[in-house]
Amino acid sequence: MVVHTDKNGFQKEVLDKKGLVLVDFYADWCGPCKMTGPIIEELAKELTDIKFVKVNVDENTELTSTYQIFSIPTFVIFKDGQVVHQFVGALGKEGFLQEIKNAKRG
């Protein structure tokens, strides 16, 4: 399951979580974001050891600024509340799996 959060829930959903959390910074009007949405949903069902969180950049400018999100979609992987990996752009499923594998190796 993919969790949508805002600034108030970010601490609980991302920073306080043990293990890996992939955060998808997106916007409703973003074409590549719409393309990756179903892939993220699919991965969330398959990879139960990772939490998937979506943050709307238009509604959460403070988080966008904090994590220096300049392009979307941007994906930030946290491990135990710390940023361990960040990448930009739409990927296919295999691309996401590779990025997650890279983050796990950390």
Image (spheres, rainbow, N blue to C red):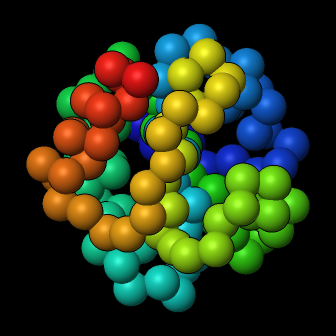
73 lies left or right of 4:
left
| Image position, residue 48 (x, y; %) | 33, 21
79 lies left or right of 39:
right
**Quarter of the C terminus within the rendering:** top left
Residue at the (36%, 78%) spot, across then down: 32
Question: In this view, which residue lies farthest toward the top?
Answer: 18
| Image position, residue 100 (x, y; %) | 32, 35
Q: Is residue 73 above or below residue 25?
A: below
Residue at the (52%, 87%) spot, across then down: 29
Residue at the (30%, 42%) spot, across then down: 99
Q: Is residue 18 above or below residue 79?
A: above
| Image position, residue 25 (x, y; %) | 57, 60
Q: Is residue 28 above or below residue 95?
A: below
Q: Which quadrant of the view contains residue 62?
A: bottom right
**Quarter of the N terminus within the rendering:** top left
| Image position, residue 52 (x, y; %) | 47, 38
Residue at the (48%, 40%) spot, across then down: 85
Q: Which quadrant of the view contains residue 35?
A: bottom left
